[in-house]
Image: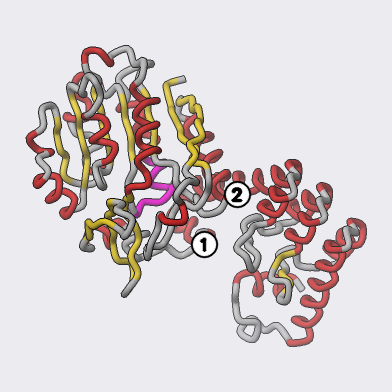
């Protein structure tokens, strides 16, 4: 029974693993019974079935949801907790793309939601540690990497970007990820987020009146850098790190290389972490990062550089908080995960909610969306 569960949960062909059709039928029957018990809100029966070998990762093929979804629908906190304890998959989605935590959230059941959400935080925290310590070990657990321009820095930097405006007049920067499909590298709808970010990073800063020093990683459309330059007292030092050759060409065309106080570092931020330019005058008053095609492990590596980049206790750091932002549970998990990692390196994070729901129906056009939630959680970090 154990080798059967391992084979099915890993996607291994049952014939190749030596598992018989009879064993497969037994396991699936147990899964059906477990799903029925969860749907019936029968905790004792569900527990007995799991102790007999019923798979906690089982998904009903007709209803297209897992046993954890069924338990969340019944709002059975004890059953949800037991399923998670026994290895139920916290981030499995149903036929509509909802996790079990999303179901609990829709029912306003905070207890069940937190059990599943916290399991996700623990899981992602562990995987991030594994990835940072051993790439080979992590590859056993982590999903296959995205080799398109949306998931691979190398592919993205070798791809051609397209600057244009959509049918609503929104300025957008696009990159092709597959024939006929483009993804927004940066889009004009982000302006309210960037405006509030600049306000929270700069307002009341002790060095504002003399001109703050700013480091921004990733230029994109230049939205946030334009906002920094538009401050009533422009930055006395404004360093921009950008790697994509098409973006650099656009920056030259727009005159960014000639702006007073602006320094453009051409390349990935990883190439400049030991650069004297970054640490001149003791660091920066404000640091911001918003890169494309990098994942959470890359962002976490940048977190570790931030304490050295900040000038002092009054300095502030922020980043584009968009990981997992097409699903409320995933977004919550990554937001909390980021706060944990930032706390580990001595940064205290405060969060502000920015309403970005308005106009969402006209936002994407023919591009794939990368932020479909009504609220953006904006982080502001300072040395703790």
- In the rendered image, residue 298 lying in the magenta stretch gets the answer yes
The main secondary structure of the magenta stretch is helix
* Residue indicated by mark 2: 329
| Residue 131 visible within the image | yes
Residue shown at 34% from the left, 54% from the top: 293
Specify whether residue 53 is in view. no
Name the outermost residue toward the left: 258
For the residue pair 216 and 84, the one nearer the viewer reads as 216
Identify the image quadrant of residue 63.
bottom right
Q: Is residue 182 above or below residue 253?
A: below
Give the mark nearest the N terminus, 1 or 2. 1
Label total for image: 2
Give the image's coloring scheme. secondary structure
Mark 2 is surrounded, within 10 Å at the Cα level, by few (under 14), some (14 to 19) or many (20 or more) other residues, namely many
Q: Which residue is painted at 51% across and 62% down in the image?
A: 140
The residue beneath circle 1 is 140
Circle nearer the viewer, 1 or 2: 2
Mark carried by residue 209: none
Element at label 2: helix
User: Is residue 317 or residue 74 the one in the foreground?
Assistant: 74
Question: In the figure, is residue 203 to the left or right of 25?
Answer: left
* Helix, strand or loop for disc 1: helix
Q: Quadrant of residue 315?
A: top left
**Position of residue 233 in the picture relative to residue 56 (left or right):** left
* Magenta highlight range: 293-301
* Residue at x-position 30% and y-position 20%: 311
């Amino acid at each position: 029974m154990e080798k059967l569960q391992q084979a099915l949960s890993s996607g291994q062909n049952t014939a190749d693993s030596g598992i018989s059709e009879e064993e497969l039928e037994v396991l699936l029957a147990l899964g059906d019974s477990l799903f029925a018990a969860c749907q019936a809100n029968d905790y004792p029966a569900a527990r007995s079935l799991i102790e007999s070998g019923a798979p906690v990762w089982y998904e009903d093929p007709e209803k297209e949801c897992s046993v954890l979804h069924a338990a969340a629908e019944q709002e059975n906190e004890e059953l949800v907790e037991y399923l998670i304890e026994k290895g139920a998959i916290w981030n499995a989605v149903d036929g509509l793309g909802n996790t079990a935590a999303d179901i609990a959230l829709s029912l306003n059941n905070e207890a069940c939601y937190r059990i599943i959400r916290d399991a996700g935080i623990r899981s992602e925290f562990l995987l991030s540690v594994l990835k940072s310590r051993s790439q080979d070990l992590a590859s056993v657990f982590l999903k296959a990497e995205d080799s398109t321009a949306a998931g691979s820095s190398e592919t993205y930097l070798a791809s051609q970007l397209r600057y244009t405006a959509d049918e609503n007049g929104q300025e957008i920067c696009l990159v092709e990820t597959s024939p006929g499909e483009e993804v927004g590298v940066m889009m004009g709808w982000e302006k309210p987020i960037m405006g509030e970010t600049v306000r929270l990073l700069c307002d009341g800063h002790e060095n504002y009146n003399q001109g703050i020093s700013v480091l921004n990683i990733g230029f994109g459309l230049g939205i946030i850098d334009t906002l920094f330059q538009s401050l009533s007292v422009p930055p006395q030092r404004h360093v921009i790190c950008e790697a994509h050759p098409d973006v650099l060409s656009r920056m030259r065309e727009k005159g960014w290389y000639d702006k007073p106080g602006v320094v453009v570092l051409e390349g990935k931020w990883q190439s400049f972490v030991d650069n004297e330019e970054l640490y001149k005058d003791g660091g920066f008053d404000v640091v911001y990062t918003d890169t494309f095609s990098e994942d959470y492990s890359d962002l976490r590596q940048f977190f570790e550089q931030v304490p050295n980049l900040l000038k002092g206790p009054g300095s502030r750091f922020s980043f584009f908080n968009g990981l997992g932002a097409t699903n409320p549970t995933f977004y919550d998990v990554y937001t909390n995960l980021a706060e944990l990692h930032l706390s580990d390196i001595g940064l205290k994070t405060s969060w502000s909610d920015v309403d970005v729901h308005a106009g969402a129906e006209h936002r994407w056009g023919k591009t794939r969306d990368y932020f479909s939630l009504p609220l953006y959680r904006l982080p502001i970090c300072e040395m703790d």
